[in-house]
Amino acid sequence: DTGVSQDPRHKITKRGQNVTFRCDPISEHNRLYWYRQTLGQGPEFLTYFQNEAQLEKSRLLSDRFSAERPKGSFSTLEIQRTEQGDSAMYLCASSPGRSQETQYFGPGTRLLVL
Amino acid sequence: GESVGLHLPTLSVQEGDNSIINCAYSNSASDYFIWYKQESGKGPQFIIDIRSNMDKRQGQRVTVLLNKTVKHLSLQIAATQPGDSAVYFCAETPYNFNKFYFGSGTKLNVKP
């Protein structure tokens, strides 16, 4: 257990539904990252927060995806109008920042869109 | 549990042997490099990192080598153990740490 938690661990939804995932990073970690991972591939960067500010977004993050980190602590990732291609593992990672850049990953949320 | 190792290059070694896992990166501007280990059903786990101003760094049983000239990174695991069996990813990021790029991964299979 790295100290980063994600909820839910598994989500099955029907195409067209909205889903929201939550990430609780390690306390006082300034940096928070979201990734998507499909079978047999490395994690793909989605977005990055420094405290509450979303500073980087991947081109992979279509307008159906939105992420927030309202108080600089937990973060949510929402996918609207899910598609079958959204099926993947969604990983969250946090790091302290301030020259301490080791990322600690959560266990991930496994999404299956039927 | 979930298998993260489907269709990945596989390195098979005998328990006790040394393992070398290689990674080529593409961005000359990358400043920081990390190796991760991922077991089935789990998130990646940090192993060792190296900054671009270094060419070698050692940890416990692991060594990372960085060759910026050819944009190559390697992970050496000494005296490989069955518990080292997993998928290994390299990752790179530019100096501002705003995004990380992961390689495609190598599956390490340790035979007892």
Image (cartoon, coloured by chain):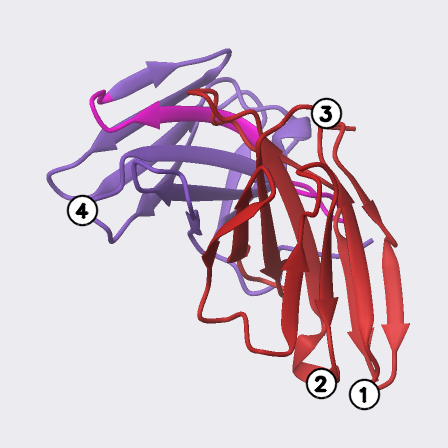
Give the CA distance from mark 2 to mark 1.
Answer: 5 Å
Residue B45 in view (yes/no): no
Asked if the residue under mark 1 is in contact with the one under mark 4, i.e. CB atoms within 8 Å, the reply is no
Q: Colour of chain B?
A: purple
Numbered circle sitting on residue B28:
4
Query: In the figure, A112 relative to B46: above or below?
Result: below
Give the residue drawn at x 52%, y 18%. Answer: B79
Magenta residues span B38-55
Residue placed most toward the observer, B46 or A27: A27
Front disc: 2 or 3: 3
Quarter holding residue A38? bottom right
Give the CA distance from mark 3 to mark 1.
Answer: 35 Å
Dots 2 and 1 on the same chain: yes
Give the CA distance from mark 2 to mark 3.
Answer: 33 Å
Dots 2 and 3 on the same chain: yes
| Disc 3: host chain | A
Residue picked out by circle 3: A27
